[in-house]
Each structure stands twice: as structure tokens, then as C-alpha cells.
Amino acid sequence: MGGSLAAALASLDVGTLFFVAICVTMLLGLFLLHAWLQEGNRALAWWSLAYLIGGASGVLWRFGETVAPVVPSGTSTVLLFIAVGMTWSGARSFHGRPIRWPVMAFGAAFWMAASCFPAFAESPASRTVVSALIVAGYTFLTAAELRRERRKSLIRRWPAIFVPMLHGAIFLFPVALATLCCMGEGGQGLAQGLAQGLTQGLTQGLARGWIVVFAIEIVLYVVGTAFIVLILAKDRTVNRYKMAAATDPLTGLLNRRGFFEAAGSLMAISRRQRMAPVSVLVFDLDHFKAINDKSGHATGDAMLQLFAKIARETLRATDIVGRLGGEEFVALLPNTAAEAAVAAERVRVAFAVASIVSDGQRIAATVSIGVASGSPATAIDLLITRADDALYRAKSNGRNRVEIAGEPAETPAASQDRAAGAPRGRGRKEQGAVDGAPESCIA
């Protein structure tokens, strides 16, 4: 079977395969360019240019003497290194990391500098090894950048990691061959160096079979990579829309719907793993209506934004923080009541010493906090109701304080009222607020 496969590979025309690879690369580059114009994702621009430059590299290598006879020898290889460097830069751009221009240009610059030395320029073995190492190095860097993405599980990320690593491993294969084979003279660029080196050290059939496999792998790699980056871009767009629907535009925290969805997921995970207690913090800014009436709604909005910033910076990244409406905020922590009370106290102190400036005047405010704890099996609305009762007690005891709720005493009907968003006690005028409106005018 192996002999039949080798014979089949040997029967394929290498020139035709590389021509197909060039055409596919250029078409995918145009496709990614169109996707960038549609999505506006800068990473797609990097990847589309990398494909187009890579395709141009192939054109110069395969038809350079016909289409561009005045182009210096070795330009195709330099463009290839620029393309793989841009692919790595696209991965960095996709995850919001800065572009490292010196590293991106290192491969091409090193090749041009090495080519100035006759010993390197006249050695196909050296050129092949260096070319393979540069391409493999950039592909491994690309895989490393994609692996650093933590917003998805490793199982969902494995194609984006495995494909470039496999491509880099295939490019390293000629390095092992070059150490065993005596390579011939001449040759321009990576592919021709591979062909000439292999034909001198191995049989013609094996060399041809490897070059055919190499050409087929290039086609599969460029197609697979294009689909992977498009899927990544699509996921990013979908996540952006989901976040927009679940985020309060004024404060940047989760809105009411987003909080309850995230809280439900966290409590489900806690139930499956270890049934550790969870705690709810309910925050209410003290005398917020007076700030609105005295300083205006713009100042009230700025105060809400200040509290959201402090809560986000003071609490942990794993804690879920949201805005229920008006001047009321809520947080869910995977902690006991005592631990949650310590976190609540940090927020209270940080907000008490903070302030905003309006019309040349420094305006400060305080916050009252209620804390309630229970098992992850407890309904989230019941925990919020208990924390709300503790918040009322904090208001009654002088405000600007943290109170911890006692054992649950709410009836099922009260729990259902809370789930439905019905006003309770002091009157939840903010329940009628619409996310995105200037809600400080409600308080």
C-alpha cells in the first residue's frame, strides 16, 4: 500500500501543485480582505495581507524569470518570511496584543544579512535549514499566541493551536534531511533548495514524493488556516454582540439580564464541583437622589460610573458584578458570608474616600451594603432578597456600613415576587428603568 501511495504521489506534477497552491493562497487572501472590510477586525487585515504577500512570493519563485525578470534573486524568500511574520502579528492583533515590529521583520532581515556572505549564499543546505527554521519558528509563535487565549476551553481552541504546530513541524523535516544529505549547487528560495538538496542525497523518487507532499500540505494549511481565522473572527463578533446585550452602557457592568445569566452559570458550576457557599452583595448609593437634585443628572451618572469603576477594581475578576438599575448594584462571590463581608468593606472604604469634580466642586458619596450567603442550590433571587433586607438594616443603622443577613426567613411568595422584579419595601423605582437610558434621573 505504501508503494502504491508513493507511486501515486510521484505521478503528480509538482509545478501544477505549486501553481494551485499559489492560486488558492491569493484567492483566500482576497476573501480575508473582504471579510476585514465587512467585520473591521484588524487581525483579518493582517492575515489577508500575509496571504497576498505569500501568494506573491510563490508567483516570484515559480514564474519570476517570466513576470518580473528584474526582481533581485531571493526576493521571493524574503516575501515568504514577511508573510509568516505577519501571520504571527495577526494572531497578536486578534487578542489585542501590541505588534512587535522588530520580531516580525527579524526573519526577512536575517535572511538578507546572511545572503551577503558567499559561504551562505552558495550553500543550498544552509539556505534550506535557515529557511525551514524561520518559517517553523513563526508558525510555532503563532500557535503560542493562540494558545494564550483563555476565554475558550483548550478543547475548543485545539484546531487553532494544532494546525500551525503541524505546519511548523513539517517545515522542520528538511532540517533533519539536510544534516544527512549532501545538497547540490544552485537553487533559489526554500522550495527549490528542498528539491535540490533531496535529489542529491536521496533517490529521485523519494525527493519527488516529499516535494509533492510538501505542496499538498501547503494547500491544506492555507485553506485550513483561513477557515480557522474566519471562525475566530466570527466568534469574536458574536461574543461582542452578546456582551453588548448583557452590558449596562452607562457603567460597563453587567445589566440585570446579564447578571442573572452569569450568576446562574457560576452557581451551576459551584453545584457540580464542590457545593461551596456563595454570597450576594447588594449595594445602594446613599442619598443619591439628593446628588441628582443638587448637582444634576450628569453628576449622578458620573457618580454611578465612579462606583462601578471602584467595584470592578476592588472585587476579583472571578466575581460577578452587575447593575440592577438606578443606584443599586449587585455582586455574586464564591465565598462565605464573612469573606464576602470583608470584600464589601473594601468596596465601601474605597468609595467613601473617592470623589468626583463637578463645576469646580468635589463631590463624594457613600454606599450601604447588604450581604447574604447560602449554598449554590439556593435560588439567586432568594439570596438577593436576603441581602436586600440586610441593606435596609444598613440604611436604618446610619448608612455607609455593611450588614450581614441572618438565616433565611422569606416565604416562597416573596422569593417569587423578587424573581418577577416586583417592588419591595422602600420601593424599587429603578425597576422600571430601561438599560441604556440616563438612569440617574430616576433616583
Image (cartoon, rainbow, N blue to C red):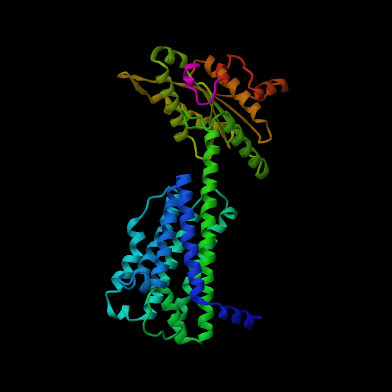
Q: Is residue 273 above or below residue 433?
A: below
Task: Pinpoint residue 320: horizontal percent, then vertical percent.
Answer: 55, 35
Q: Tell me if residue 303 is in the magenta stretch.
A: no
Q: Count the numbered circles shown.
A: 0
What secondary structure do most residues of the magenta stretch adopt? loop
Q: Tell me if residue 434 is in the magenta stretch.
A: yes
Q: Is residue 51 above or below residue 367?
A: below
Q: Is residue 388 above or below residue 6?
A: above
Q: Nearer the viewer, residue 321 or 181?
A: 181
Quadrant of the drawing holding the N terminus: bottom right
Task: Pinpoint residue 294: horizontal percent, then vertical percent.
Answer: 40, 12
Q: What residue sits 40% from the left and 66% below the top?
A: 57
Residue 332 as seen in the image, left or right of residue 301: right
Q: Nearer the viewer, residue 345 or 247?
A: 247
Part of the protein shown in magenta:
433-443
Task: Pinpoint residue 426: horizontal percent, then vertical percent.
Answer: 58, 14
Task: Pinpoint residue 106: horizontal percent, then vertical percent.
Answer: 34, 63
Residue 193 picture quarter: bottom left
Q: What residue sits 59% from the left and 36% below the top?
A: 262
> Residue reaching furthest right?
412
> Residue reaching furthest front?
66
